[in-house]
Amino acid sequence: MPVNLTEGSVFKNIAVFSTPYFIAYFLQTLYGLADLFVVGQFEGAEAITAVAVGSQVMHFLTVMIVGLAMGTTVLTSRAVGAGNLRSVSRITGNTIVLFSLFAVISTAVLLLLCGPIVSLLKTPAEAVDGTVRYLQICFAGIPFIVAYNLIAAIFRGMGDSKHPMYFIAVACVLNILLDYVFMGGMRLGAAGAALATVLAQSMSVLVSLFAAKKLHLGVKLCRRDFRPHKALFKGLLNIGAPIAAQDGFIQVSFLFITMIANSRGVEIAAAVGIVEKIITFLFLVPSTILSTISAIAAQNMGAEKPEQAKKTLWTGTAIAAGIGLFFAVIFQPFSEPFLALFSSDASVVRFGTEYLRTYVIDCLVAGIHFCFSGYFCACGLSILSFVHNALSIVLFRIPGTWLAAEYFPDTLTPMGLAAPAGSLFSVLFCFFAYWILQKSLLLQKDSARA
């Protein structure tokens, strides 16, 4: 049966739900790195470049699918909180219809656009063929990527974050094993990496479907649940579409920042690349808390416990900010030895240390607005999350990075401040939006009493 996250200790509910979620995020991040690690042992620079470029495209697509699936998690959580399992069935059926359409259309379109995508990314000529083959295989496997994230979203909406962790663990282990078979044994290069990824993902989907059938979730689907329901489609898209657009926008901004760094020379490009990978891992924490707050707060709102939802927001914010503060402090003295683990080039280590010491402050500041974004999603106001992130990128991150490159060519310290500056704007935006939202809710209560 669904897990009740509306009672008991708020801190305990967050800890119990977020820990498996974090592990799943971590495994999903390792998923792409495994391909690069294995291909580097058996192939040359062309295959490595093909996998690196192809996996970047697939990561871009995956984060957008995950964002779109947030609508399913939130609506399912609300229905579970209200004790309405019949509504959960209708949400599940309509989600399957919506995501099936998305999978078919995106697969067809992206397969046709493989060549233009590779060209747009300025892929080196030697790696073009391998990158195209990698993307063709991965794009053909989009239905499995969509299916996994759909099933995971439904489980998490039911308050169960453990089983999605098991499903991605199966895919991760199988992917690594198949990498060695296809690239080490059969020497298929980049195509082997893509084939391993798709087969591992398909096996994960089969395991998750088997688990869904064996576990008694209290949800019984019937034919009418698959009839498109306009209000449900609108609800799913109103929450999921802004998150998907926001995540896509963030990935595009990273590409711009990478281009700016690349223009400053190979040492700076390498330093920025290493630090971005480190930050990706550190940001697993606020990303996990965001999704946790979305699911738990939505369930409490469905149960008509808005105060419990607000406690979830503030407790999650304290956790995320506390961990972010720890990272921001610990990396001040240890940035240099940590960067030295990734490069023996003194210039790369120096530039990377400068960049990381200021950029890591974003773990603290962004941890706060991530939590508010999760709460806004639970309220059905994910558009607020998109707006503040978009404004942060357009007004601070990209201009700040460009200005730092122009006026401080010999150091990366100012460039690292662009991200925390953007996040500070987002925090102020979120506080103001939260105040307006709470004031509006109080006015509604007063009107209802009158």
Image: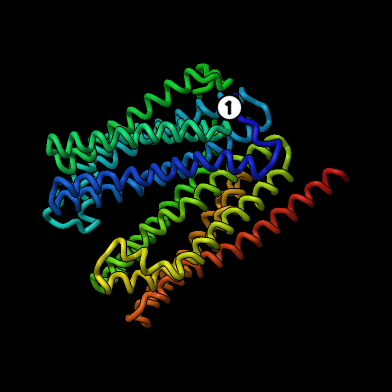
The residue closer to the viewer here, 342 or 36, is 342
The answer to whether residue 41 is seen in the rendering is yes
Classify residue 442 as left or right of residue 63: right
Classify residue 159 as left or right of residue 306: left
Residue 11 x %, y % = 65, 45
The answer to whether residue 233 is seen in the rendering is no
Image quarter of residue 62? top left
| Location of the C terminus (image quadrant) | top right
Residue 84 x %, y % = 65, 26
**Amino acid type of the residue tagged 1 in the rendering:** Val
- Height in image: 27 above or below 210? below
Image quarter of residue 124? bottom left
- Height in image: 159 above or below 437? above
Residue at 47% across, 45% down = 67
Residue at 15% across, 42% down = 189
Residue at 19% across, 56% down = 123
Residue 109 x %, y % = 29, 40
Q: How many marks can you see?
A: 1
Residue at 74% across, 45% down = 307
Name the residue beneath numbered marker 1. Answer: 88
Crowd band around label 1 with a 10 angstrom C-alpha radius: few (<14), some (14–19), many (20+): many
Protein image colouring: rainbow
- Height in image: 41 above or below 253? above
Residue 53 x %, y % = 25, 52
Classify residue 154 as left or right of residue 441: left
| Location of the N terminus (image quadrant) | top right
Q: What secondary structure is marked by label 1? A: helix
